[in-house]
Amino acid sequence: MFPALIAVLGLYGVVTGQTESPVSAATTNAWSALTGSQSSFHRINAIAVNGSDVYIGGEFTDLNGDAGRDYLAKWNGTSWSNVGGNSAINGPIYALAVLGSTLFVGGEFTDAGGVPLADSIAAVDMNSGSWSALGDNGAAGPPLAAGKYPLTLVAESASSSLLVGGNFNSAGPATNTRYVARWSPSPGTWSALGTENFPYQGNPGGVSAIAIDSPASSYYVGGFGASTSANLLLKTTGGTWDAVAWGATMSTARSSFTGGDYVGIYSLLKDGSNLYVGGNFRSAGGTHSYLAVLATGDNSWSAVGSGAPCSYGSFPARCVRNISKVANAVYVSGDFGIRRVNPSDNSEHVMLSDFVYSASAGGSNIYFGSNGTDIGGVAAADYVAKFSPSTNSNLDAMSTTAGSLNTTFQSGTTSYTTSTVSTSATITANSENTGSRVEYSTNGGSTYALVPQSGTTSELALAVGTNSWRVRVVPSDPSGVATVYSLTVTRTIPPLVNTSPPTVSGTAEEGQALTGTSGTWTGLASSVRSWYRCTAAGATSVNSVPSECVAITGQAGATYTLTASDFAKYIRFSVTATGDDSTVQQLLSASTAVIAILPASTSTSSTVAPTTTVAPTTTPATSSASATTATPATTAPGTTTSSTTSTVPPTSSGATSTKIAVTKPLSAPPPLTLTLGKTLSIKIVIAKTTKGVSAAGLPAGTKFTAKTGVISGKPLKKGTYTVTVAGLASGKRVTVQVKITIT
């Protein structure tokens, strides 16, 4: 990329030790107007620069309201003037070139400056303003046949000659000059670039771009035509046209032609070992359309920036019309506007979206002919304007880790805002001008510190509230004006929010480990974990611990191993969170399944001492219950069980109290039936000791007293309940189930 600034909001330290006095914010984008150029649109097809003088040629008349200033004009930095007299040219101009003190002009005109034979191509002395023809055709006629004209003129200073490309079949009396030829002012002769004509012979057809491969004395030539398959990019070295051994493949296939423009290559730029190629071709190297760069060392093609944004069938259809280089940047222009490309990393910047017909670099500046007004946002920069990279103080890009800017970055917009909840933010800025100096200040500081072009990273926490950052771009040309960009970042404290609650996973069985997850939070500063044992199941709860839940002492980790105390209970995992905003929330997970007893899978047998079975007792007639022969109880795998036959005969008053003793063998007690509203009293004796005895599945309104083994109380709801009582008998786990129906 271009010079980069990487800083962090709120940084007060000087990165390099160099400081600059602050300047007031000012915006300059290095564009300037050629004042009073035109009051209405006229197409400018060609631009040539000679020192501080700028020559434009095109299809305009009476430029700047001056009668007779037609098709050709000169700008001397302050005003416009005619070239070679009033109304010297009587038709459109397509190409211009400067060689020494001579300006060469090509287009559809006759008798330039009143000189016979100065048709389609002519020369004017830039000092005296006198016109001359470029020889003749050997038969006292113009050097180019009527209706034929140049499309590109390239001055070759090494040979003091002019390279001419166009739609002509011959130039002067010289042979092998179809479409491309050389004019040597001294001795005033035409000659061929090759030992044969340019290979393409289509009609229409011609040459529209030439690049010199200095100092190899070879030339790259780009043609155009109606063919959909011709290779129109060729090279000549020593006079031989080489399209095969050269090996640079390019398909110019195109499905349609519009607007009088044909498929071809309309701009070439040789830069070191790279050849930039632009036009409306397809598939350079099998991949790239409209714009590509050829590495002439190995004849490999690659993309230029993101490529030219054109499409076939649109009008006009030349797409890339000009490729120029100033300083370290390549400027590509055409139907889509202007894009600046940095060859070092192939990054690009969109400079202009107006249609651009022509461009020419001169010194440290580049001039563009366009159909736009107020080019670059500069008043009166209409249809032609100057861009001075050395005075450019724009940023090419600016971004921040603090979040998205309030609007898409544009070099002409200097103020931006964003917001973040982050505690620090990094700012990255890249300048358009490779020679500019990038400086910054923060939070209203009055000193700008220079950041090295190699880039540096600094970091500082953002304060809650408003943080400001400014970057100043100082152009390399002292006549330029610095531009200051500002970015305001507001740091907010995020609220504490839970987006997914805590959870518990694992097997709900004694001896198994449960795992709790804290859920997902935003704005979380810290959290504390805990585990709860509950007598009833429950869903996730917020800031409320159910009354049936008790914290398990000493358990604050992410895992918990179930014990005998958890039998017939439910376990829940809790997270107490503290937010960045100091708020506190406690969330309890949904409960586990009811905890089961530990299977005695390692037991081989058990002996349970028999006890006496006590017959049911009777109660007053106000009670009602009955018992019948029982179904064997279901026990956990590996649990000790026995079987016997036992009945509890119903009584006229209804049995409501029975002592069920575990014997060997024994069976589950018979089902009992009780009328709603009556009092239930059942005693279950598992062993002489009550150690570890518990019950689950009790009807609402009843309770189990482990010490006595009694289930008692007045049931509150009708239904059938299977009550499981478990305990230790001779060191082994034993369960007994009794079915109770409330009617």
Image (cartoon, helix red, strand yellow):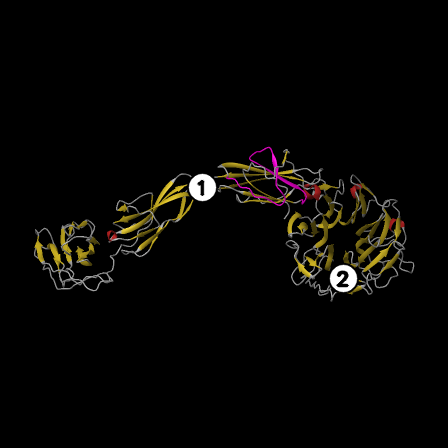
> Upstream in the sequence, badge 1 or badge 2?
2
Q: Residue furthest right?
A: 140
- Tell me where the magenta segment starts and ends, as one range: 433-461
In this rendering, does residue 202 appear at all?
Answer: no
Q: 300 or 723: nearer the eye?
A: 300
Q: Within the magenta stretch, is there residue 253?
A: no
Q: Within the magenta stretch, is there residue 453?
A: yes
Amino acid type, callout 2: Lys
Q: Secondary structure at mark 2?
A: strand
Q: Residue furthest front?
A: 17
Residue 266 screen position, x and y as percent:
74, 56
> On the image, which quarter does residue 486 sit in?
top right
Query: For the residues carrying marks 1 and 2, which lies nearer the camera in this image?
Result: 2
Residue 353 screen position, x and y as percent:
66, 48
Question: Total of numbered circles in the picture?
Answer: 2
| Distance from Cα at disc 1 to Cα at disc 2 | 65 Å
Left or right, 575 with respect to 443, comes to left
In this rendering, does residue 424 appear at all?
Answer: yes
Label 1 crowding class (10 Å Cα cut-off): few <14, some 14-19, many 20+? Answer: some
Marker disc for residue 494: 1
Left or right, 649 with respect to 36, comes to left
Position of the C terminus, as image quadrant, is bottom left
Residue that numbered label 2 is attached to = 235
Residue 352 screen position, x and y as percent:
67, 47
